[in-house]
Image (spheres, grey):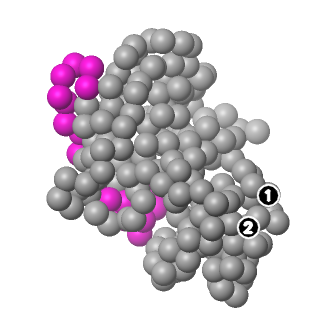
């Protein structure tokens, strides 16, 4: 598992539940360390153990925790760089949805050895879409539900999302766009500003 993914989980846990929770989780998972390095590659089993330990510590299903992680990745100030990468997908939420087919390629442009599962958007009607999440990263569809929900808020769109489960090897998320301009979206400036 790429260290960026593990580091994102670590950042999410520390920001949401506190450093003490993270320390309990790493001890319970038997990692032997408490800090993931963003540019290293780790055994997948380490990530699995961390998520299992986190689920047990919080007494919550992994799918809910991963959905919260997806929301965190878009909405938390620590993750502004990722938000910017996602927002380059389009001016509207619908344009963003159509850009998801290229997300794994855009991620690889940013970090050449980061491999995200392939996503495929299918338009059921002008207001209903299905996002097909192909295998490659366990829990990725749950994270994407959180991402999609947070990005809808970011654009000011009102969308209903439902994780439909598996259709063969593919996990399916249904997106119903209720209103594309429901509220004012968060400010987004194409050019990044230095602090």
Q: Name the quadrant of the C terminus.
A: top right
Q: Are marks 1 and 2 in contact (CB under 8 Å)?
A: yes
Q: Position of residue 56 (x, y in %)?
A: 63, 68
Q: Position of residue 75 (x, y in %)?
A: 61, 38
Residue found at x 56% / y 42%: 71
Segment tinted magenta in the rendering: 107-128
Q: Is residue 91 left or right of residue 130?
A: right
Which of these two is toward me, 61 or 67? 61
- Name the quadrant containing residue 127: top left
Q: Which residue is mark 1?
A: 18
Q: Which secondary structure, mark 1? A: loop
Which of these two is toward me, 73 or 143? 143
Q: Residue at the far right: name it.
A: 20
Q: Is residue 178 left or right of residue 56?
A: left
Q: Is residue 34 above or below residue 92?
A: below
Which of these two is toward me, 37 or 171? 171
Q: Is residue 100 left or right of residue 185?
A: left
In reply to whether residue 122 is colored magenta, the answer given is yes
Q: Which residue is mark 2?
A: 22
Q: Is residue 112 visible?
A: no
Q: Is residue 98 left or right of residue 50?
A: left
Residue found at x 40% / y 27%: 160
Q: Is residue 129 above or below residue 169?
A: above
Residue 115: numbered disc: none
- Name the quadrant containing residue 99: top left
Please tell me how crowded label 2 is: few (under 14), some (14-19), or many (20+) other residues with Cα within 10 Å.
many
Q: Position of residue 143 (x, y in %)?
A: 46, 51
Please tell me how crowded label 1 is: few (under 14), some (14-19), or many (20+) other residues with Cα within 10 Å.
few
Q: Is residue 53 visible?
A: yes
The residues bearing labels 1 and 2 have C-alpha atoms spaced at a distance of: 7 Å
Residue found at x 56% / y 71%: 52
Q: Is residue 2 above or below residue 148?
A: below
């Amino acid at each position: 598992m790429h260290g960026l993914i593990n580091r994102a989980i670590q950042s999410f846990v520390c920001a949401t539940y506190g450093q003490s929770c993270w320390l309990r989780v790493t001890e319970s998972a038997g990692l032997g360390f408490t800090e993931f390095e963003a540019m290293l590659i780790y055994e997948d089993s380490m990530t699995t153990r961390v998520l299992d330990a986190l689920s047990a510590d919080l007494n919550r299903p992994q799918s809910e925790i991963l959905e919260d992680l997806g929301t965190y990745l878009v909405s938390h100030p620590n993750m502004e760089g990722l938000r910017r990468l996602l927002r380059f997908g389009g001016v509207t939420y619908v344009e963003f949805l159509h850009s998801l087919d290229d997300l794994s390629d855009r991620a690889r442009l940013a970090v050449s050895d980061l491999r995200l599962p392939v996503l495929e958007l299918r338009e059921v009607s002008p207001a209903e879409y299905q996002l097909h999440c192909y295998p490659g990263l366990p829990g990725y569809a749950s994270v994407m539900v959180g991402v999609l929900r947070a990005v809808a808020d970011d654009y000011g769109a009102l969308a209903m999302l439902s994780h439909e489960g598996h259709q063969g090897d593919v996990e399916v998320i249904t997106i119903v766009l209720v209103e594309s301009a429901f509220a004012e979206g968060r400010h987004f400036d194409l050019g990044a500003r230095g602090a």
